[in-house]
Image (spheres, helix red, strand yellow):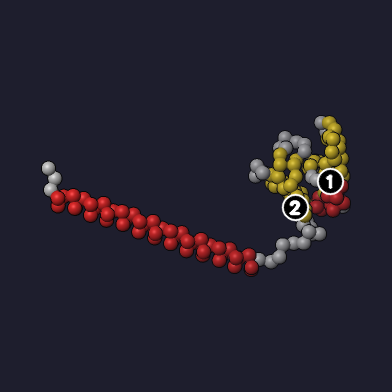
């Protein structure tokens, strides 16, 4: 048989444990809220201090696909005043210096066959890269 004082001690212990758990959750919630507030303020201050992004007539960024070669795949094609940069979703980065580009065209011809749509062909002294973009003719004009 249990003594009534044992039940009271057990009840108090459980209540005390419950209070500690609730207080721990409240403290964790307050810490999480303060960190989110601090992170959002620092991000907004960082964005306010950054210069405006380059205008679209200078830098052009568009989703693209490498249309031919062993490393075919999707990514982003970016044209800057000095470079053409393909950043693949796989992490591959291809940088072509604009000064090293010797030919640009929109073509349906690939070394292994023909395509239904035109792609951007960029030729350097050593190789030709083929990029599937939405408007290959416009990209070719920008690169000339």
Is residue 102 shown to the viewer in this render?
A: no
Nearest to the observer: residue 84 or residue 26: 26
Q: Earlier along the polypeptide chain: callout 1 or callout 2?
A: 2
Is residue 48 placed above or below 1 in the rendered structure? below
Residue 17, position as x, y percentages in the image = 28, 53
Is residue 7 placed above or below 110 in the rendered structure? below
Nearest to the observer: residue 116 or residue 78: 116
Q: In the image, what residue occupies the spot 51% across and 61% down?
A: 36
Identify the image quadrant of residue 81: bottom right
Q: In the image, what residue occupies the spot 71% across and 65% down?
A: 52
CA distance separating discs 1 and 2: 13 Å
Is residue 142 placed above or below 1 in the rendered structure? below
Which quarter of the image is occupied by the N terminus?
top left
**What residue sits right under mark 1 in the picture?**
136
Q: In the displayed structure, does residue 6 sit left or right of residue 23?
A: left
Residue 139, position as x, y percentages in the image = 83, 49
- Find out whether the residues at labels 1 and 2 contact each other: C-beta distance under 8 Å: no
Residue 45, position as x, y percentages in the image = 59, 67
Q: In the image, what residue occupies the spot 21% across and 50% down?
A: 10
Residue 98, position as x, y percentages in the image = 80, 52
Count of picture labels: 2
Nearest to the observer: residue 111 or residue 107: 107
Q: In the displayed structure, does residue 56 sit left or right of residue 107?
A: left
**What residue sits right under mark 2 in the picture?**
61
Element under label 1?
Answer: helix
Q: In the displayed structure, does residue 141 sit left or right of residue 16?
A: right
Q: In the displayed structure, does residue 37 sit left or right of residue 68?
A: left
């Amino acid at each position: 048989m249990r003594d009534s004082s044992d039940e009271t001690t057990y009840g108090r212990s459980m209540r005390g444990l419950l209070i500690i758990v609730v207080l721990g959750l409240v403290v964790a919630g307050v810490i999480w809220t303060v960190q989110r507030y601090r992170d959002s303020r620092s991000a907004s201050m960082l964005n306010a201090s950054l210069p405006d992004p380059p205008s679209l007539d200078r830098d052009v960024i568009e989703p693209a696909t490498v249309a031919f070669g062993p490393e075919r795949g999707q990514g982003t094609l970016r044209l800057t005043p000095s470079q053409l940069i393909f950043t693949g979703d796989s992490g591959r980065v291809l940088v072509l210096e604009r000064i090293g580009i010797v030919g640009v065209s929109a073509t349906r011809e690939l070394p292994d066959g023909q395509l239904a749509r035109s792609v951007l062909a960029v030729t350097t002294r050593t190789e030709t890269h083929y990029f599937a973009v939405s408007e290959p003719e416009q990209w070719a004009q920008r690169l000339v």
